[in-house]
Image (cartoon, grey):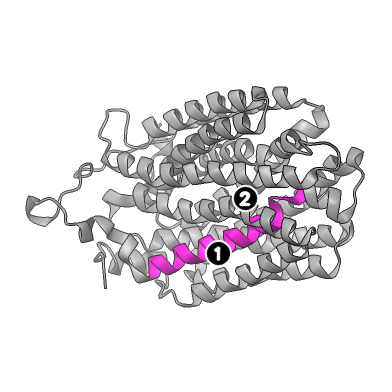
């Protein structure tokens, strides 16, 4: 597989294609239950008028599962950095995360009550976190000049994954149990297959961390990028912007049913239409923004503008809480979120100081995004219950997106990836 091996910090089209397919599978099996299957399992547990309880259960389960993933991601990344098996550093963890995800999806599909669904979803979240940590580390390990493009594949795959999953369930008329079986098979084939095919080159001198002079590293040295001011601002921004995005998307099916007033028999179709619109703009924005950031080396301005565009989508839906208004807002949010996620991940990767901690540090980057996505449903459920409506939910989404843009202003970012490689390698852990 020499054609897949990176050369001079660049990877070929086949590497990027396989990497994108792997992320497509990750997002499909994670977001299809979040957007459709879990709300259907948890809707109106006490009867047709008990929709608030369903919203609260959905928020609790997604948040608890997300918290488990937040803990598992950096831990798996740290262990991956120290792994020295003949199978590579990232591959064993990618395969292990895939197997856990597939098994937990099957259990989620047969769970008969909210507590059982929640327990099984914790397993899904942990498996996805382990797999994501291994995949994200491959960007820092093998890519230098195309980090914006590789990061764009991650964010665009997120949007396409929702369409693939929800579209398959709705158009094929799959039941809840059959949907989970299909998702488990999908991640099993794609996850294991891409993990085996993608290169996982051995890097001499990596494994167990050792400080200069052969001494055990101090706690300050162990923190690495985590104590860096700029890296910290990027993490805070990703947390805040993702929280704003989660408020605008996680309870979308409930919004269509009880905010817009879509008939129950057509709500799933309406959701699919909105997801397709959102996807088209996320994919286009992420690929264009990632490519521009690679060519110009200027990632920070793109990140700021993208967060503000996402905030605009919340304003639009507040002005017109109708299906048409929601569709327009979905397009605007897709532009903002797609560009933001692609370029902010590339910006965070540019700021990494030490290659022996790539998976751990990028695991924390994933945590920042995932923490926002897991807190969103819980906070959103509380906001909806507080006012028995959705206006406060979208107001908070817009405010948080603006705050994320403001946080990015504080980042002192490298001008270009190439100058970063020349002048910041290795970069001191602190300033």
Residue 141 relative to residue 342: left or right: left
Residue at 44%, 29% in the rendered image? 95
Q: Which residue is mark 2?
A: 156
Q: Give whichever of 290, 61 is nearer the camera.
A: 61
Q: Give whichever of 163, 109 is nearer the camera.
A: 109
User: Is 224 located above or below residue 45 in the figure?
Assistant: below
Q: Secondary structure at mark 2?
A: helix
Farthest-out residue, front: 46
User: Is 419 located above or below residue 152 in the figure?
Assistant: below
Q: Which residue is mark 1?
A: 240
User: 10 Å neighbourhood of mark 2: few (<14), some, or many (≥20)?
Assistant: many
Farthest-out residue, left: 213
Q: x, y (%) of residue 119? A: 55, 32
Q: Which residues are magenta?
A: 230-253
Residue 173 relative to residue 150: left or right: right
Q: Where is the N terminus found, in terms of image quarters?
A: top left
Residue 233 relative to residue 399: left or right: left
Q: Secondary structure at mark 1?
A: helix
Q: x, y (%) of residue 283? A: 66, 53
Main secondary structure found in the magenta portion:
helix
User: Is 423 located above or below residue 210 in the figure?
Assistant: below
Decide if residue 353 is in sight here.
no
């Amino acid at each position: 597989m020499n054609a897949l091996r990176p050369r001079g910090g660049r990877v070929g089209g086949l590497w990027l294609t396989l990497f994108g397919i792997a992320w497509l599978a990750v997002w499909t099996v994670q977001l299809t239950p979040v957007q459709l299957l879990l709300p259907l399992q948890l809707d109106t547990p006490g009867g047709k008028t008990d929709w608030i309880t369903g919203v609260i259960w959905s928020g609790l389960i997604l948040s608890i599962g997300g918290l488990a993933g937040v803990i598992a991601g950096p831990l798996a990344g740290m262990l991956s950095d120290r792994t020295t098996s003949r199978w590579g550093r990232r591959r064993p963890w990618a395969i292990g995360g895939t197997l856990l995800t597939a098994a937990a999806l099957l259990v989620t599909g047969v769970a008969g009550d909210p507590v059982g669904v929640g327990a099984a979803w914790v397993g899904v979240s942990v498996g996805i976190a382990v797999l994501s940590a291994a995949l994200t580390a491959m960007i820092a390990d093998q890519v230098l000049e195309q980090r914006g493009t590789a990061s764009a594949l991650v964010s665009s795959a997120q949007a396409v994954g929702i369409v693939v999953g929800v579209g398959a369930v709705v158009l094929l008329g799959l039941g809840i149990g059959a949907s989970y079986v299909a998702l488990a098979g999908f991640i099993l084939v794609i996850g294991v297959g891409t993990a085996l095919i993608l290169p996982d080159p051995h890097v001499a001198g990596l494994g167990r961390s050792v400080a200069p002079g052969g001494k055990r590293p101090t706690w300050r040295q162990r923190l690495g990028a985590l104590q860096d001011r700029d890296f910290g601002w990027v993490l805070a921004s990703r947390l805040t912007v993702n929280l704003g995005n989660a408020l605008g998307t996680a309870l979308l099916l409930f919004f269509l049913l009880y905010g817009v007033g879509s008939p129950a028999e057509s709500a799933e179709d309406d959701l699919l239409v909105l997801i397709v619109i959102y996807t088209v703009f996320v994919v286009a924005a992420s690929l264009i923004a990632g490519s521009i950031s690679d060519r110009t080396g200027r990632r920070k301005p793109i990140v700021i503008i993208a967060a503000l565009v996402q905030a605009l989508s919340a304003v639009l839906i507040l002005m017109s809480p109708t299906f048409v208004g929601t569709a327009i807002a979905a397009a605007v949010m897709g532009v903002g979120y797609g560009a933001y996620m692609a370029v902010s991940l590339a910006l965070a990767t540019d700021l990494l100081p030490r290659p022996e901690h790539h998976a751990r540090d990028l695991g924390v980057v994933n945590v920042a995004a995932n923490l926002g996505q897991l807190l969103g449903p819980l906070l959103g459920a509380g906001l909806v219950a507080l006012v028995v409506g959705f206006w406060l939910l979208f107001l908070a989404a817009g405010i948080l997106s603006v705050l994320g843009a403001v946080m990015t202003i504080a980042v002192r970012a490298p001008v270009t990836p190439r100058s970063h490689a020349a002048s910041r390698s290795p970069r001191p852990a602190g300033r």
